[in-house]
């Protein structure tokens, strides 16, 4: 079983890439160690050290390309490169001398991030999505591409904090007669009522934003109105008070065709495939280790109560589902803000 696992691991392309990265790190350490062994207080700057330095700084490893780049540097650029290398090397040696890398969680995270960066770069380069996969992504994520209904309206506001709920509603009813009697236009709304926490005019706004400003009840009422650029209606109640509304436009929601959003779908399908491949690669690294869970330590901490493996898996799945749900909510919010 162990033999088959080793054979499978050796066939994994990611392993080859990681070994290459490790070799480069070793080479980098070798150059640094040679310089440190000669004299800890002397920083030797030579071509090899600078070549290795700029490759790691660029996060790209192509000796021939960077040798040419090094040769093309002006004297001023070369002096700046030497200054940057000297500064980094001096700070690195000082940190090592102070043993700041020992039992340091930040250093641990940096190493993990470096490995994830290498893994991500390698897996991303491997991923290609087919036309069928792009189409399938569109079909399984239709709700994300649906254009939501929008309304355009303005409003006149009376504050319940300032007047009380009943008085604010009474003021709104009296103002409604004046607005319709005086044929007050959309653009004249800012000259009436009281200052509202958010906006006066709302142009092509979706239900989610309207609900966040006026509450779900009023949002539902507004989206049920038929457009009328001559009529003020209300009063409508929000958590802040009473509102009179002129709603002039209601755009129905719709699902764009695949061709209309193909570029976006392709980008997001490829990103999803890259994320999946990255997680598979990380999991292959984790799976290469044997994990020994010493349950007696947990039993001591929990007063002797042991958690079964089945319960642990259920708890882990619950945590994963919760994390996915949070990620979905954050993604929806980000797309709303982007729009």
Image (tube, rainbow, N blue to C red):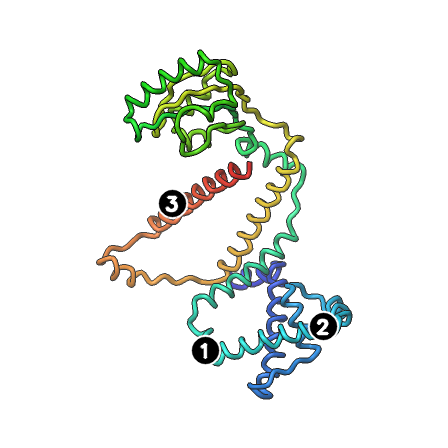
Label 2 residue SS: helix
Return the x and y of residue 101 as percentages of the image width and height: 47, 73
Q: Which dot, 3 or 2, sits closer to the camera? A: 2
- Residue drawn at point x = 40 percent, y = 34 percent: 197
Alpha-carbon neighbours of circle 2 within 10 Å: few (<14), some, or many (≥20)? few
Alpha-carbon neighbours of circle 1 within 10 Å: few (<14), some, or many (≥20)? few
Whichever of labels 1 and 2 marks the residue nearer the N terminus, that label is 2
Q: Residue furthest bottom?
A: 38
> Quarter of the image containing the C terminus?
top right
Q: Which dot, 1 or 2, sits closer to the camera? A: 2
Q: Image quadrant of residue 136?
A: top right
Q: From where the camera sits, is residue 226 visible?
A: yes
Q: Image quadrant of residue 102?
A: bottom left
The disc label shown at residue 76, or none: 2
Label 1 residue SS: loop
> How far is the residue under mark 3 from the one under mark 2?
58 Å
Return the x and y of residue 72 as percentages of the image width and height: 77, 69
Residue with the mark numbered 1: 99
The disc label shown at residue 62, or none: none
Return the x and y of residue 19 as percentages of the image width and height: 61, 67
């Amino acid at each position: 079983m162990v033999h088959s696992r080793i054979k499978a691991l050796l066939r994994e392309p990611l392993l080859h890439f990681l070994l290459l990265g490790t070799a480069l790190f070793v080479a980098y350490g070798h150059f640094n160690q040679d310089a440190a062994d000669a004299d800890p207080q002397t920083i030797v700057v030579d071509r090899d050290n600078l070549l290795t330095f700029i490759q790691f700084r660029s996060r790209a490893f192509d000796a021939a390309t960077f040798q040419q780049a090094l040769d093309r540097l002006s004297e001023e650029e070369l002096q700046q490169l030497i200054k940057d290398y000297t500064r980094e090397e001096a700070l690195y040696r000082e940190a090592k001398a102070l043993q700041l890398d020992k039992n340091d969680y930040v250093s641990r995270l940096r190493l993990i991030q470096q490995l994830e960066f290498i893994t991500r770069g390698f897996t991303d380069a491997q991923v290609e999505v087919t036309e069928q996969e792009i189409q399938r992504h569109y079909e399984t994520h239709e709700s994300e591409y649906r254009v939501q209904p929008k309304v355009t309206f303005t409003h006149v506001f009376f504050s319940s904090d300032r007047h009380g709920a009943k008085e604010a509603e009474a003021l709104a009813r009296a103002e409604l007669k004046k607005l319709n009697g005086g044929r007050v236009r959309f653009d004249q709304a800012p000259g009436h009522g009281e200052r509202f926490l958010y906006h006066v005019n709302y142009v092509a706004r979706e239900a989610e934003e309207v609900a966040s400003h006026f509450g779900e009840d009023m949002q539902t009422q507004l989206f049920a109105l038929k457009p009328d650029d001559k009529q003020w209606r209300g009063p409508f109640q929000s958590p802040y008070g009473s509102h009179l509304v002129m709603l002039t436009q209601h755009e129905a929601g719709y699902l764009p065709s695949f061709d209309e959003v193909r570029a976006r779908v392709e980008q997001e399908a490829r990103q999803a495939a890259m994320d999946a491949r990255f997680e598979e690669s990380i999991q292959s690294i984790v799976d290469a280790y044997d994990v020994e869970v010493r349950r007696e330590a947990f039993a001591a901490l929990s007063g002797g109560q042991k958690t079964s493996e089945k319960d642990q898996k259920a708890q882990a799945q619950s945590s994963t589902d919760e994390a996915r749900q949070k990620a979905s909510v954050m993604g929806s919010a980000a797309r709303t803000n982007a729009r």
